[in-house]
Image (cartoon, rainbow, N blue to C red):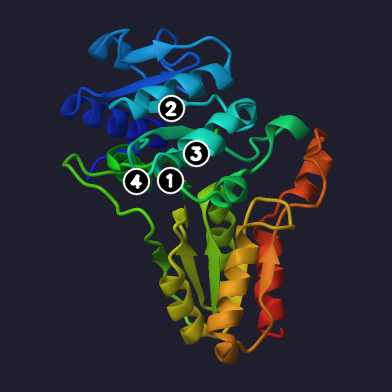
């Protein structure tokens, strides 16, 4: 099987769907002439032309609103935000229009639209460019939220998102676009709302998603040397969430650690914790531990940023805590 970059997987997913369906198009800042801020739309302007790969002004509220109206009228726009930090400017269109129009119109309108772009931190970008918004959007009925962690999942899930009749938030990472992984050349999709066990284990379950899951893999490698077996679940989709896969794993390992790149209050890990304690409390042999960023805005200083962001050592400590070691 061939190996391609994350950005190439995203580009392939969009291009394949645009070839199949003329109502699918891409719009956003620098997606056309510049081939995308992260080169995730490289070559698409040449293939599909300026009517379907559209450079927009720096006005997220404006082009998000245009895309919502376009989707209500039978098109399937893909909206790229240079970062979801900038999507805050257009969040009213996403939450108050895209997510609600099916219900508010009594089913007369649907909104098949994908809002995609990078989320969370990307190194030394400071407080206003390093925020994770998965739980914000997942808190909104009517939105589906996808956060892939590798090229294979990114392509299969993005194709499913584009085909979906409802609005989907598709969150990537600036630090994953160069990641490489095996991706088949043939047609495939991955169903939305299905988590995957990336590593089998018997002593503790670790749940994570997005780029931060790499720290769980690194921790599991180190812990294996000490005879500790970690089962790692990649959520892939935050909403709808695959509770069954998590619960089945916890009932096997009896311990749960959740790793998430977000602030500690009211996040995805909080929801997982509630679901597990309410449905599998008797299987737990230790309190659930969740690992998050520090409860402050992201610092600019590299030294402080290293302390702010969770790493594999934090995962190792959490695993040993639930194992009482």
Relative vertical location of residue 251 with respect to residue 298 in this rendering, above or below: below
Q: Quadrant of residue 298?
A: top right
Q: Earlier in the sequence, mark 3 or mark 4?
A: 4
Disc 2 target residue: 68
Q: Earlier in the sequence, mark 1 or mark 4?
A: 1
Secondary element at image label 1: helix
Q: Nearer the viewer, mark 3 or mark 1?
A: 1
Check if mark 2's residue and mark 3's residue have beta carbons within 8 Å: no
Q: Is residue 286 left or right of residue 118?
A: right
- Where does residue 113 sit, x and y in percent of width and height? 38, 33
Calculate the distance from the C-alpha at mark 2 to the C-alpha at mark 1.
15 Å
Q: Nearer the viewer, mark 4 or mark 2?
A: 2
Q: Earlier in the sequence, mark 3 or mark 1?
A: 1
- Where does residue 272 sit, x and y in percent of width and height? 58, 68
Q: Would you call the spot at circle 1 few (<14 residues within 10 Å), some (14-19), or many (20 or more)?
A: few
Disc 1 target residue: 103
Relative vertical location of residue 75 with respect to residue 148 in this rendering, above or below: above
Q: Nearer the viewer, mark 2 or mark 1?
A: 1
Q: Earlier in the sequence, mark 2 or mark 1?
A: 2
Residue at 62% over, 63% down? 269
Secondary element at image label 4: helix
Q: Which mark is residue 157?
A: 4
Calculate the distance from the C-alpha at mark 1 to the C-alpha at mark 4.
25 Å
Disc 3 target residue: 172
Q: Quadrant of the N terminus?
A: top left
Calculate the distance from the C-alpha at mark 4 to the C-alpha at mark 2.
21 Å
Relative vertical location of residue 176 with respect to residue 233 in this rendering, above or below: above
Calculate the distance from the C-alpha at mark 3 to the C-alpha at mark 4.
12 Å
Check if mark 1's residue and mark 4's residue have beta carbons within 8 Å: no
Q: Is residue 138 left or right of residue 314?
A: left
């Amino acid at each position: 099987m061939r190996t391609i970059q994350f950005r190439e997987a995203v580009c392939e997913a969009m291009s394949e769907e645009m070839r199949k369906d003329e109502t699918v198009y891409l719009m956003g800042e620098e997606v056309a002439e510049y081939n995308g801020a992260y080169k995730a739309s490289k070559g698409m302007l040449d293939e599909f032309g300026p009517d379907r790969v559209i450079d927009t002004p720096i006005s997220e509220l404006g082009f998000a609103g245009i895309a919502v109206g376009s989707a209500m009228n039978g098109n399937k726009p893909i909206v790229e935000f240079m970062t979801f930090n900038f999507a805050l400017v257009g969040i009213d269109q996403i939450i108050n229009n895209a997510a609600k129009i099916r219900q508010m119109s009594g089913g007369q309108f649907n909104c098949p639209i994908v809002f995609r772009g990078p989320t969370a931190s990307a190194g030394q970008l400071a407080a206003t460019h390093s925020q994770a918004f998965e739980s914000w959007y997942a808190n909104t009925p009517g939105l589906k939220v996808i956060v892939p962690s590798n090229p294979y999942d990114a392509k299969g899930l993005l194709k499913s998102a584009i085909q979906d009749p409802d609005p989907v938030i598709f969150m990537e990472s600036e630090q994953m676009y160069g990641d490489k992984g095996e991706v088949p050349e043939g047609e495939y999709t991955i169903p939305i709302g299905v988590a995957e066990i990336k590593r089998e284990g018997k002593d503790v379950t670790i749940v994570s998603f997005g780029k931060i899951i790499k720290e769980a893999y690194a921790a599991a490698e180190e812990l294996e040397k000490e005879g500790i077996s970690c089962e790692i679940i990649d959520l892939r989709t935050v909403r709808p969430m695959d509770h069954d896969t998590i619960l089945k794993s916890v009932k096997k390992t009896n311990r749960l650690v959740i790793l998430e790149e977000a602030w500690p209050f009211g996040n995805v890990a909080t929801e997982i914790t509630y679901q597990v304690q309410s449905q599998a409390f008797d299987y737990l042999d230790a309190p659930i531990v969740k690992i998050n960023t520090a409860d402050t805005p992201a610092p600019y200083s590299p030294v402080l940023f290293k302390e702010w962001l969770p790493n594999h050592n934090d995962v190792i400590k959490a695993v040993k805590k639930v194992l009482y070691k």
